[in-house]
C-alpha cells in the first residue's frame, strides 16, 4: 500500500482510458486540465512543458506509450511491437536531458517484449499489461518521494531556512515531489523556519509552480530572483539548499535546471550543505560523468520574451541551455528513496542501483 | 577639451533651460525623450528608474537642482539657499544606494553656499553658477569614462570573451559608460572576441538596456539569463567580468546591482578576473565597508510581475533587494578615471581620492 501523501496536487493521472494532465504552462493564473487521448498529443505536451520535471516525464512517457498501444490495430504481435517501438522513439525524442523518460519507456518496452513472447495470439492483453506497468511506475514514484522526504528531512536542521531552485515538487512527479518532498516532510516535522525559492528564469518554474504548490499546501515561501541567492546566502539567511535532478551520472555529477551549478558554488563558498533529491530512476550509470549528459538548448524566445512580452531588442544573440552540470564535488549528499548517498559517489551509486539497472 | 566618444547615446542633456531625458523604462521597445522642467518631475523620474545608473544619477540630480534653483522666487540669498537645500533633500531621498547622487548635490550646494557669500544682492547669478557646475559634472563624467575605457581596455586580453551584468553603459552615465566604456574601448582595439550580458532580473536592465545600447553601436552581445553565468564560466567560455558600481566603500567593498556578488564568487571559483569600473565619485570614504552601505529594497511587484504581467501566485512573500555587496577580496581591480587600483584597497583608494574628498 502506498501511504497517503500530504498534498492533493496530481499533475498526471490515468482516468478511464485517457490521461488527465494539469497544464503547467497556465499556472499559476489558471488551473486547467487537459484530456489526452493520443500519444502524439502527449509528445507535444512534453515538448511544450505542459508536463515537466524528470519523474513526471517518466510517468507521462509511460502513459503516453499506453495510449499508443491502445490505438494499435495490428493483427499480430510483431506488428504490434513495431508500432509500440515507433511511438516510443517519438516520445523519447521530446526531451533529451531527463533520463527518467527513456527509463520508463524502456520498462514498458520490456513488458511489451515479454508479453509478446508469452501471449502469442492474445494481443488484446498487451495494452493492459503496459498500463499496469505504467501504474506501477507512478505508484513507485509516489512511494519513493515519500521515502525521499523521510530520508531528507533528517538532514534539515531544526529551525532551518531552506533554499530550492526550479520546481522539483508534486508538479514534477506523480505526487509529493523530490526536493519539495524533503521540504514538505521537514515542514510537517516543524523543522523549517523559512523557505526561499528562486523564480528560475527563463521559464519561471519557481515563481509559477513552486510558489503555487507550496501556497496550496499552506507552506509560505519567499520568492526571489535567481540573482538574489548569493545575497541571502552571503547574509547567512540560508542553512541548506535542496534541489532535484534531471539526470545523475555514474560519478555523481548532477544535471539539473540551469542555475543549479551557480547555487552549488555559492553553497560551497559559504560552507552550507547542497542536497540533491531524486529517485534512483534519475541515476544513469551508463553515462560516466556530467560531460556525457546531453544539454537541451531551447528556443531563444524563452529568454527574449516573458509570457509573450518582448524584453530584449530584436536581433540580439541569445543562448538558452535549459540545464547545467553540477560536479559531484559540490554535492553534499544525494537523497534517494533507498537512502542518502555521499562521496565516494562512483562506488556507492553503483552499489545502490547497479543490480537493478544491470537486470534491465 | 572633452574628446568625442564613440557612441551617440545621451541619456540626459541640458537643452535651453530644461532637461531632455531618455525614458529608460520604455527601452528597448520605444525611444522616448522626456522634457523635464520641474525638479519634482526629476525626482519622480529617478524614483521610477526613467533615469538610472550611479553616474547618470549624479548628473540627473545636479540638473534637477538647477531646475529647482531656476524656479525660486526668493528675494534674498538666505531664502534662496533654504529653498535649494530643501529641493536637494527631496532629490537625495529618491535612491539610497548610489553615492553619486548625493555627491553631485553636495557639489552644487557648495557652489550655492559660496555664491551666496560672494554675490550678496545678485541672486539672479546663482542658478547660472549651479548650471555651470552641473555641466562640469557631466563633462567630467564623460571624460572620466573615456579614461576608464582606456585604462580598462589594457586589462582585457587579446581575443577575450567578456561578461557584464546590469547596465553600466552610456545609459548609466552622461556618455560612453563605465563597464561598457571598457567594453567599447577594448572592442575598438579589436581585443574582444565575444560579449555576454546577463538580462539582470528583476528590472532587466541587461536585456533592455545593455543589449540595446551595444546593438546601437554595432557590438554584438549574447544575452543570457542571470542563472546562466555559472554555466558559461564553468565551460571556460568567459575570460573576464567587468561590472559597474553604485558605491565603493573605503575598504574596496562594492555595492552594485543584485546578482553581482554571485558572479564575483563564480569568477573567483574559476580563477578569472573580476573588474569593477567606476569613476572616483563612486568611492565613498565615509563608509568603512560594505555592511555600512544602505541597500535599497524595492516593491515586490518588480519580482512578481514582468512588464505588467503576473508571473507568480498572488499572496506569495517576496524579497527585492536592488543591490548586493561584493567584498573586496573578490575584486581583482577597480578601474577608475585616474587609473587602476588593486589590493590593498584601503590604503590605495584613500590615496587616490582622499585629498579631493577631504577638500569637500
Image (spheres, coloured by chain):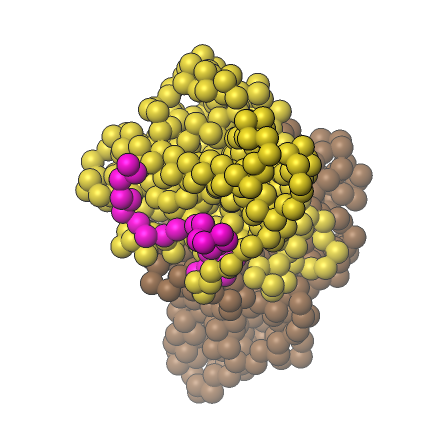
Chain colours: A brown, B yellow
Q: Is residue A347 above or below residue A358?
A: above
Please report the residue visible at 54 percent of the width from the left and 26 percent of the height from the top.
B118
Check residue B13 for magenta coloring: yes
Please state which of residues B231 and B112 is positioned toward the viewer in this rendering: B112
Residue B309 locus on image (x, y percent): 60, 64
Please report the residue visible at 29 percent of the width from the left and 44 percent of the height from the top.
B5
Instruction: Please tell me in which quadrant of the rendered image residue B92 appears.
Output: top right
Residue B58 locus on image (x, y percent): 50, 38
Q: Is residue B90 above or below residue A59?
A: above
Check residue B121 for magenta coloring: no
User: In the current view of this chain or complex, which residue is farthest to the top?
Assistant: B347
Q: What span is colored magenta in the figure?
A: B1-29
Instruction: Please tell me in which quadrant of the rendered image residue A113 appears.
Output: bottom left
Task: Please indicate whether residue A90 sits to the left or right of residue A35 in the image.
Answer: left
Please report the residue visible at 67 percent of the width from the left and 51 percent of the height from the top.
B300
Q: Is residue B140 visible in this depiction of the protein?
A: yes
Q: Main secondary structure of the magenta part?
A: loop
Instruction: Please tell me in which quadrant of the rendered image residue A185 appears.
Output: top right
Q: Is residue A295 visible in this depiction of the protein?
A: no
Count of numbered tags: 0
Task: Please indicate whether residue A82 sits to the left or right of residue B317 in the image.
Answer: left
Residue A190 locus on image (x, y percent): 80, 39
Please state which of residues B240 and A77 is positioned toward the viewer in this rendering: B240
Please state which of residues A237 and B35 is positioned toward the viewer in this rendering: B35
Can you say which quadrant of the picture contains the N terminus of chain A? bottom right
Residue B256 locus on image (x, y percent): 51, 36
Please report the residue visible at 32 percent of the width from the left and 56 percent of the height from the top.
B215
Amino acid at each position: 500500500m502506498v501511504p497517503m501523501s500530504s498534498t492533493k496536487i496530481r499533475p498526471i493521472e490515468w482516468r478511464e482510458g485517457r490521461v488527465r494532465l494539469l497544464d503547467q504552462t497556465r499556472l499559476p493564473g489558471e488551473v486547467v486540465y487537459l484530456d489526452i487521448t493520443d500519444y502524439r498529443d502527449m509528445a507535444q505536451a512534453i515538448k511544450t512543458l505542459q508536463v515537466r520535471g524528470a519523474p513526471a516525464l517518466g510517468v507521462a512517457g509511460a502513459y503516453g506509450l499506453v495510449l499508443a498501444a491502445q490505438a494499435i490495430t495490428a493483427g499480430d504481435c510483431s506488428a504490434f511491437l513495431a508500432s509500440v517501438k515507433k511511438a516510443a522513439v517519438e516520445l523519447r525524442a521530446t526531451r533529451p536531458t531527463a533520463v527518467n523518460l527513456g527509463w520508463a519507456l524502456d520498462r514498458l518496452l520490456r513488458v511489451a517484449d515479454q508479453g509478446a513472447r508469452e501471449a502469442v495470439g492474445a494481443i488484446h492483453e498487451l495494452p493492459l499489461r503496459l498500463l499496469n506497468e505504467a501504474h506501477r511506475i507512478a505508484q513507485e514514484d509516489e512511494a519513493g518521494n515519500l521515502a525521499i522526504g523521510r530520508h531528507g528531512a533528517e538532514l534539515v536542521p531544526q529551525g532551518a531556512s531552506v533554499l530550492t531552485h526550479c520546481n522539483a515538487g508534486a508538479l514534477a512527479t506523480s505526487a509529493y515531489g523530490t526536493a519539495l518532498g524533503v521540504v514538505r516532510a521537514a515542514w510537517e516535522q516543524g523543522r523549517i523556519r523559512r523557505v526561499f525559492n528562486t523564480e528560475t528564469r527563463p521559464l519561471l518554474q519557481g515563481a509559477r509552480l513552486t510558489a503555487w504548490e507550496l501556497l496550496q499546501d499552506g507552506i509560505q515561501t519567499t520568492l526571489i530572483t535567481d540573482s538574489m541567492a548569493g545575497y541571502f546566502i552571503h547574509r547567512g539567511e540560508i542553512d541548506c539548499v535542496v534541489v532535484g535532478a534531471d539526470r545523475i551520472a555514474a560519478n555523481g555529477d548532477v544535471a539539473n535546471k540551469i542555475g543549479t551549478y551557480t547555487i552549488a558554488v555559492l553553497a560551497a563558498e559559504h560552507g552550507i550543505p547542497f542536497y540533491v533529491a531524486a529517485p534512483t530512476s534519475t541515476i544513469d550509470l551508463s553515462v560516466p560523468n556530467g560531460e556525457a549528459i546531453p544539454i537541451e538548448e531551447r528556443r531563444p524566445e524563452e529568454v527574449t520574451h516573458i509570457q509573450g512580452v518582448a524584453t530584449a531588442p530584436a536581433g540580439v544573440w541569445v543562448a538558452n541551455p535549459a540545464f547545467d552540470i553540477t560536479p559531484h564535488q559540490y554535492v553534499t549528499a544525494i537523497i534517494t528513496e533507498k537512502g542518502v548517498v555521499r562521496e565516494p559517489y562512483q562506488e556507492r551509486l553503483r552499489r545502490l542501483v547497479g543490480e537493478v539497472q544491470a537486470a534491465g
